[in-house]
Image (spheres, grey):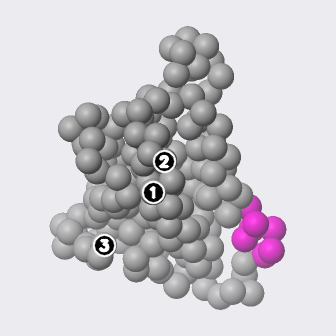
Amino acid sequence: MERAVQAFGRIDVLVNNAAFQMSHASLDEISDEEWDRTFAINIGAMFRITKAAVHHMRPGGAVINTTSVNLDTPRPTLVAYAATKAALQNFTGSLAQLLADKGIRSNCVAPGPIWTPLIPSTMPPEQVKTFGSDVPMKRPGQPAELAPVYVLLASDEASYVSGATVAVTGGKPVI
């Protein structure tokens, strides 16, 4: 972040896109350490990065957080991950209100099943085989299919959009 500020004098857009998840069939399988790690990466890091970045943002700036469809329809095997993504949506909504008087917008993108390296590395092989088949489009999305939403939320065309959650889910509603 400091390199960006040194090079450009400010931060115009902050995209928080980090996550850790593990799939478990019961609460007993989730260690306290894993629970804490999931919260530290998925919400704690975004809080700290955002707190540091807003000092370098001017009116017109945008914070875009990546949450998940799991904020609205949590999977029982992703207890820790889903809880952090719901927390992130609430953080984004609070931030939108807190930063409005500074002219800084805060929104989040809620992807559905998107094919990333996280999927095969954190899910059982039988779930990986059918990943994305349960949404109306019957397939996982590709990361590039998320890009237009981030570009819109970062642009001046979204100057009145703040506190929103934009779902990119292959047809699965997030209400």
Quadrant housing residue 7: top right
Classify mark 3: residues with Cα within 10 Å, few (<14), some (14-19) or many (20+).
some
Q: Amino acid at mark 2?
A: Leu
Residue beneath the point at 56% across and 37% down:
54
Camera sees residue 25: yes
Q: Which residue is mark 1?
A: 97
From the top left corner, tell me how far across and down residue 163 is, in percent: 38, 58
Q: Which residue is mark 2?
A: 99
Horizontally, residue 40 falls left or right of residue 164, namely: right
From the top left corner, tell me how far across and down residue 131 is, in percent: 37, 68
Quadrant housing residue 168: bottom left
Please, is residue 74 above or below residue 131 in the view?
Answer: below
Please, is residue 5 above or below residue 69 in the view?
Answer: above
Q: Which residue is mark 3?
A: 174
Q: Earlier along the polypeptide chain: callout 3 or callout 2?
A: 2
* Residue stretch in magenta: 31-37
Q: Earlier along the polypeptide chain: callout 1 or callout 3?
A: 1
Residue beneath the point at 25% across and 43% down:
158
Please tell me whether mark 3 sits on a helix, a strand or a loop: loop
Horizontally, residue 33 falls left or right of residue 24, namely: right
**Image quarter in which the C terminus is found:** bottom left
- Image marks 2 and 1: residues in contact by CB distance under 8 Å: yes
Q: Amino acid at mark 1?
A: Gln
